[in-house]
Image (cartoon, rainbow, N blue to C red):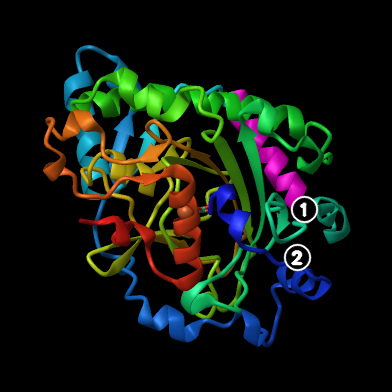
């Protein structure tokens, strides 16, 4: 869940009891606050292991190569339209930086609770950054996720609260800075090809994500899902869509857990080694007038192995608004499938709806 979310909601601190639960994995009985069997049963079936399906794979090197660019761009476009998700290979992000980010995340979560709580969520108001449990709303209200996470603003640089960036491991802050810059570069590269696919100018799409507006930026979520002997009873993250523009997820290990909802069923992502998982957020869905889909997803813990991920969210807006690109409407406002709304109002609405278990995007539909 993106960091901006928590502006309107408080989050829970991780208690000693939860930390013990997370570190042992020999729990005989899972405490009631984590049990969500009903919610899980109501949410739809998971496709079986044997069922063949393929989450689209997009190759950045092929996007960049004039020989293959057109066909790979079409693949990128259909992934964003049909799945709202794809795995990205040959992405060009510095492998050493990725490796250090993975290690830093894993090292942070392996620290004793006391050290992690040095940057605990303060709760309430805009003090949303730091370490703790996710907020769970809607049908999850009052329940706790089988996960611990860190949320931080990473861009613009002047918007960072570096005192909340882990000081342990000591290399963490430098690594996150480099990783954040790499992610900006990656988003820029990808957006150029999305613009070609959409038929909007590259400048307009890049401006929507990166022009000087102070409200735009980048945030990150670092998640640790401890193993759980009863994965059918708990959730790592309840179903949600991402409320910003574009999300890029890095697996720090090869444990699966992310599931995508499609046609009423949950499709487990089988992470490809070395690939990022990229998905369309609600704002990009509106900017593209519904052409690109922001799709519901969730995380279930693994029975045997822990899972650590690092997620980067890239924010977007057009002239302070969340609205379909005028270029896509051919000068005819009647073609807009969503009502325009101010960026701040959108963010507030998104988190209010998340808390209520509804989807704000639906209320913007014409
Ligand atoms: O950790 C994951 O696989 C997904 C995390 C996620 O959906 C989020 O942070 O919004
Ligand atoms: Fe998400």
Q: Quadrant of residue 263?
A: bottom left
Residue 9 within the segment the image draws in magenta: no
Which of the two residues, 332 or 325, is positioned nearer the viewer here?
A: 332
Instruction: Quote the CA–CA distance across marks 2 and 1.
Output: 17 Å
Residue 105 within the segment the image draws in magenta: yes
Image check: 210 left or right of 179?
left
x and y percentages locating residue 258 in the rendered image: 45, 57
Using a 10 Å C-alpha cutoff, classify the residue at mark 1 as few (fewer than 14 neighbours), some (14 to 19) or many (20 or more): few
x and y percentages locating residue 241 in the rendered image: 41, 56
Please say whether residue 92 is visible from this viewpoint.
Answer: yes
Q: Which residue is mark 2?
A: 13
Image check: 124 left or right of 79?
right
Up-down: is 103 above or below 96? below
Image check: 355 left or right of 105?
left
Q: Which residue is mark 1?
A: 110
Q: Quadrant of residue 148?
A: bottom right
Please say whether residue 62 is visible from this viewpoint.
Answer: no
The mark lying in front, picked from 2 and 1, is: 2
Looking at the image, which residue is at 74% across and 52% down?
109
Tell me the magenta residue range: 96-109
């Amino acid at each position: 869940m993106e960091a901006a979310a928590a502006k309107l909601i408080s989050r829970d601190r991780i208690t000693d009891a939860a930390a013990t639960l997370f570190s042992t994995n020999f729990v005989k009985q899972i405490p009631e606050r984590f049990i969500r069997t009903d919610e899980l049963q109501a949410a739809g079936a998971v496709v079986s292991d044997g069922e063949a399906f393929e989450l689209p794979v997009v190759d950045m090197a092929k996007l960049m190569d004039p020989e293959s660019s057109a066909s790979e761009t079409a693949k990128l476009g259909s992934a964003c339209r049909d799945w709202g998700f794809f795995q990205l290979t040959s992405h060009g992000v510095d492998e050493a930086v990725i490796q250090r980010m993975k290690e830093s995340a894993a090292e942070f979560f392996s620290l004793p609770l006391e050290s992690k709580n040095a940057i605990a969520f303060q709760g309430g108001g805009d003090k949303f950054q730091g370490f703790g449990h996710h907020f769970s709303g809607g049908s999850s209200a009052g329940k706790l996720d089988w996960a611990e996470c860190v949320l931080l603003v990473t861009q613009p640089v002047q918007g960072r609260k570096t005192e909340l960036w882990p000081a342990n491991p000591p290399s963490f802050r430098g690594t996150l800075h480099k990783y954040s810059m790499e992610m900006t570069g990656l988003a820029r590269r990808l957006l150029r090809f999305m613009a070609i696919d959409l038929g909007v100018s590259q400048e307009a799409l890049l401006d929507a994500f990166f022009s000087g507006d102070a409200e735009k930026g980048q945030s990150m979520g670092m998640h640790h899902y401890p193993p759980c002997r009863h994965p059918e009873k708990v959730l790592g993250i309840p179903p949600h869509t991402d409320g910003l523009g574009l999300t890029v997820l890095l697996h720090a290990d090869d444990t699966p857990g992310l599931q995508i909802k499609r046609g009423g069923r949950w499709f487990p992502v089988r992470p490809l080694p070395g690939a990022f998982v990229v998905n369309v957020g609600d704002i990009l869905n509106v900017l593209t007038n519904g052409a690109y889909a922001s799709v519901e997803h969730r995380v279930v813990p693994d029975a045997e192995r822990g899972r650590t991920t690092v997620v980067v969210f890239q924010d977007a807006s057009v002239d302070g608004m969340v609205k379909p690109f005028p270029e896509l409407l051919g000068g005819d406002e009647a073609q807009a499938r969503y009502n325009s709304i101010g960026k701040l109002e959108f963010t507030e609405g998104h988190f209010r709806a998340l808390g209520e278990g509804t989807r704000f995007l639906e209320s913007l539909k014409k």
